[in-house]
Image (tube, rainbow, N blue to C red):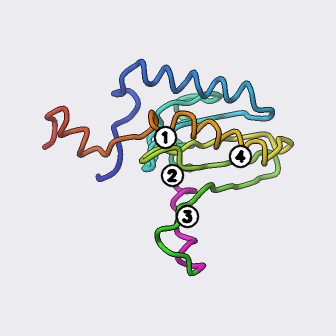
Amino acid sequence: MSGTAPHAASMPLDRRGTMTFLLERFKDAVPGVLVAELATTDGLPLAMVGMDKDSAERLAAVGAGMHSLGRGIGPVLGRDRKSHLKQAFFETDTERVFSMSAAEGTLLTVITSVDADPSLTGHEMTVLVQGVRAHLATPTRSATAQATGDEQ
């Protein structure tokens, strides 16, 4: 399957730990944030706070789906294919779900309570991503395999 890097388990521990630390700080600093996750664009969790591993895997798939749906709306609206999706957003009776590109091959997905300020959440997501974007890129799987000599 073409896409992004392997599951977080094969990522160096220092990178996973740093990403988790950043997500914890984000969750603690932004009122109403319940869950924050970094995942690959093809739905593999990289780092998360506020949920267990099974939920993280489901949320990674949901975030990837939201991002894909959002990107698909551009052509329907007559937009140039070069336009980039800034953020996808869903709201239920009890939560809000935000998903945005964090870097090449990486998404940031956040779940908040319904009473959280969506403008503040979106702004703080952007600030987080802009501050560490260079460190969040997820290389493609084929590039990772070539670098380690594991390509089959």
Residue matched to label 4? 122
In reply to whether residue 69 is colored magenta, the answer given is: yes
- Whole-number angstrom distance, CA of label 4 to CA of label 1: 17 Å
Q: Earlier in the sequence, mark 1 or mark 2?
A: 1
Q: Is disc 3 in contact with disc 4, using a CB cutoff of under 8 Å?
A: no
Question: What amino acid is labelled 2 in the image?
Answer: Ala
- Whole-number angstrom distance, CA of label 2 to CA of label 3: 9 Å
Residue matched to label 3? 69
Q: Main secondary structure of the magenta part?
A: helix
**Residue range of the region highlighted in magenta in the rendering:** 65-77
In this image, 108 relative to 32: left or right?
left
Residue matched to label 2? 64
Question: What amino acid is labelled 4 in the image?
Answer: Gly
Q: Quadrant of the C terminus?
A: top left
Label 4: element kind:
helix
Question: What amino acid is labelled 3 in the image?
Answer: Leu
User: Closer to the camera: disc 4 or disc 2?
Assistant: 4
Identity of the residue furthest to the bottom in this view: 78
Q: Is disc 1 in contact with disc 2, using a CB cutoff of under 8 Å?
A: yes
How far across and down, in percent of the image, does residue 41 sit? 45, 49
Crowd band around label 1 with a 10 angstrom C-alpha radius: few (<14), some (14–19), many (20+):
many
Label 3: element kind:
helix
